């Protein structure tokens, strides 16, 4: 059955955990969908894990639309959430609605995600007023890497913790149907989860959240540039790929690939006629 914003609401009420992973292409999305994932986030993390940038700052709307459309074609039942890249919603609410609309119309997402709390309240209000469901994202927001001075846990001190709690209430009030809590202390994320009506989706925020999200290249050990503390590697897919590629190289060089079963036949008669030419 198709997962929708209503499914998220129901899961918050029943206490069933929400599962979300990132994906950026058709085949991966299809595989995750078949495995039964509730939601697929086409994250702007694609800037790092797909495009090799150092952070998410250079990612464009065109990048996001392209990858979101690929994922949407593979996701039959998972809710597809398209991430709004840096500077695609920061100017004003009109810009935010325009670009959120593109992710829905051209990328075929069913919801959008954007980073920030109080600072993007008007944007969340405007997007949800346009009937586009919004996932908010607070705590450590990667698009603020330059403002934070690096990828750092947020909310350890009282002032920051208070601000994050306030942000959570603000994004809920503005109309977000879920909120991502990234890299905040477990107790703070649990406190927020217990006080909000909308589900929290944690990444580096502990098991008290209503759901979890991970970048799939982290979860499957494909991305090797660095491994955040909060990542669990559920399978060594990177190692499997490396081994598969090495086997392909070795067999091709040895002439054992392709074998007979990988080839197509032609009638001897046709070959004989060719020889006559
Ligand atoms: O871009 C992304 O993948 C994200 C997740 C880390 C939540 O925002």
Image: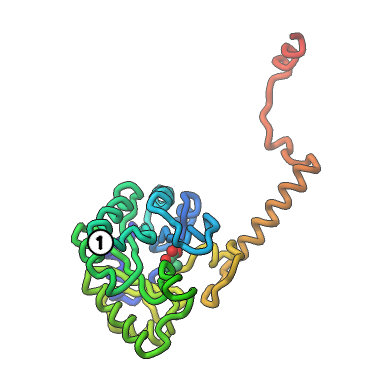
Q: Position of residue 69 (x, y in %)?
A: 39, 48
Q: At 47% from the left edge and 68% from the top edge, which residue is drawn?
A: 214
Residue extending farthest top: 277
- Front residue of 202 and 270: 202
- Front residue of 6 and 182: 182
Q: Position of residue 82 (x, y in %)?
A: 37, 57
Q: At 33% from the left edge and 52% from the top edge, which residue is drawn?
A: 103
Q: Relative to 137, does residue 129 appear above or below in the rendering?
A: above
Give the quarter of the figure containing the N terminus.
Answer: bottom left
Mark 1 near ligand 1 (CB under 8 Å)? Answer: no
Residue extending farthest left: 129
Direction from residue 148 to residue 165 in the image, left or right:
left
Count the marks: 1
Q: Position of residue 171 (x, y in %)?
A: 27, 73
Q: At 54% from the left edge and 62% from the top edge, which residue is drawn?
A: 217
Give residue 5's quadrant in the image: bottom left
- Residue 207 visible in the snapshot: no
Which residue is label 1 attached to? 92
Residue extending farthest bottom: 158
- Residue 185 visible in the snapshot: yes
Count neighbours of disc 1 (C-alpha within 10 A) and say few if under 14, some if 14 to 19, many if 20 or more: some
Give residue 136's quadrant in the image: bottom left
Q: At 25% from the left edge and 70% from the top edge, which residue is drawn?
A: 121
Q: Relative to 264, does residue 173 appear above or below in the rendering?
A: below
Direction from residue 226 to residue 67 in the image, left or right:
left
């Amino acid at each position: 059955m198709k997962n929708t914003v209503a499914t998220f609401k129901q899961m918050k009420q029943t206490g069933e955990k929400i599962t979300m992973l990132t994906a950026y292409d058709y085949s991966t999305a299809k595989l995750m969908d078949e495995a039964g994932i509730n939601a697929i986030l086409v994250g702007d993390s694609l800037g790092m894990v797909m495009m090799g940038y150092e952070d998410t700052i250079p990612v464009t709307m065109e990048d996001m639309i392209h990858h979101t459309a690929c994922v949407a074609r593979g996701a039959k039942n998972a809710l597809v959430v398209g991430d709004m890249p840096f500077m695609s919603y920061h100017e004003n609410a009109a810009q935010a609605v325009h670009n959120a609309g593109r992710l829905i119309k051209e990328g075929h997402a069913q919801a959008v995600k954007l980073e920030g709390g109080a600072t993007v309240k008007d944007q969340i209000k405007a997007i949800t007023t346009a009937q586009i469901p919004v996932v908010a994202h607070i705590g450590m927001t990667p698009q603020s890497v330059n403002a934070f001075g690096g990828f750092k846990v947020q909310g350890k001190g009282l002032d920051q913790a208070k601000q994050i709690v306030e942000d959570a209430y603000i994004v809920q009030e503005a109309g977000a149907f879920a909120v991502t809590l990234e890299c905040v202390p477990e107790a703070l994320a649990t406190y927020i989860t217990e006080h909000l009506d909308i589900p929290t989706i944690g990444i580096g925020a502990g098991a008290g959240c209503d759901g979890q999200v991970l970048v799939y290249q982290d979860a499957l050990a494909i991305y090797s540039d660095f491994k955040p503390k909060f990542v669990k590697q559920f399978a060594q897919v990177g190692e499997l790929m490396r081994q598969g590629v090495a086997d392909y190289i070795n067999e091709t060089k040895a002439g054992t690939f392709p074998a007979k079963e990988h080839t197509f036949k032609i009638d001897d008669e046709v070959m004989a006629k060719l020889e006559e030419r």
